[in-house]
Amino acid sequence: MRIAFMGTPDFAAVALRALIDAGHEIAAVYCQPARPAGRGQKPQPSAVEKLATAEGLEVRTPKRVRDAEEIQRFADLKLDAAVVAAYGLILPQEILDAPTYGCFNIHGSILPRWRGAAPIHRAILAGDTETGVTIMQMDVGLDTGDMLKIGRVPITPVTTGGALHDQLAILGAQLMAETLAEIDALTPVKQPEEGVTYAAKIDKAEMRLDWSLSTDQLDRTIRVFAPRPGAFTEILGERVKVLAAEIVKSTGEPGCLLDDALTVATADGALRLTQIQRAGGKPLAAKDVLRGWSVPAGTRIG
């Protein structure tokens, strides 16, 4: 098929790779403009832009797609379909209607649960035991379009945000390739009216560990932000990322260290921090960090 691809981060790049490998004609790739990043704050192209450039594909990075000129440029591509994955811009009806088969979205949840910006994070934070990917025929609503394919994966007590992201990216790419191959045989299904939830964008404040919360809540917060960007707390006045922890049977004053091995009391139990990252350092096992850093029992953190 002749398609346009619209996406920006790593999650989307996996799908673009799959569509290239499937032999589709990629007429144009749309992604967000390069953003300042790193210590030098130099503009860095997105994962999708890097892949598209390496493959010799036309890359378009408009700040808006609602302008008449941009809509016409899109229509002039004469597309069979457009594939959208974590693009970052809302598409107007004129864009959605331009391709012969319309626009399809790869969404990282089982709709209608977790419509919105952060479905992977919200599923783990809420304690869901299952999530997945929905391939959706796009309309102008917020992830409200008819469903074409659904894939499911379990969320276990040790699932991290990074691992789930990668698993869903691969699943979404596979389902999207299947959708395009089978498009004439698929019957769109309307989303259920019940069970709608919204995955609000993650606020940086949510990454701070609040030791007055339950052990389960804190464990999920640590896992969902691992390995990047990392949940954090303050230890002896220093901000420290907490990348892994284990639940232990102990109690105490929330935020108080119960031993010399970074076991922290929570509202209803305790967590032992097992992997941390000090400012400017690398992620290390907590026991290795403590060889050169004394953080005694009784210390209050956070």
Image: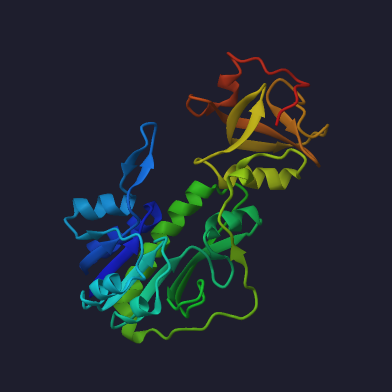
Front residue (pair 95, 259): 95
Residue 287: horizontal and vertical position, in percent?
Answer: 60, 22
Residue 2: horizontal and vertical position, in percent?
Answer: 22, 74
In which quadrant of the rendered view does residue 78 lie? bottom left
Q: Is residue 95 left or right of residue 116?
A: left
The residue lying furthest to the right in this view is 252
Q: Is residue 23 above or below residue 244?
A: below
In which quadrant of the rendered view does residue 44 lie? top left
Identify the residue at horizontal 59%, vertical 25% (top origin).
286
Q: Is residue 125 left or right of residue 97?
A: right
Number of numbered markers: 0
Q: Is residue 15 left or right of residue 227?
A: left
Q: Is residue 199 above or below residue 179?
A: above
Front residue (pair 218, 57): 57
The residue lying furthest to the left in this view is 56
Q: Give the quadrant of the N terminus.
A: bottom left
Residue 251: horizontal and vertical position, in percent?
Answer: 82, 34
Residue 79: horizontal and vertical position, in percent?
Answer: 24, 77
Q: Is residue 142 above or below residue 159?
A: below
The residue lying furthest to the front in this view is 68
User: Which scheme is used to colour this image of the protein?
Assistant: rainbow
Identify the residue at horizontal 66%, vertical 57% (top origin).
126
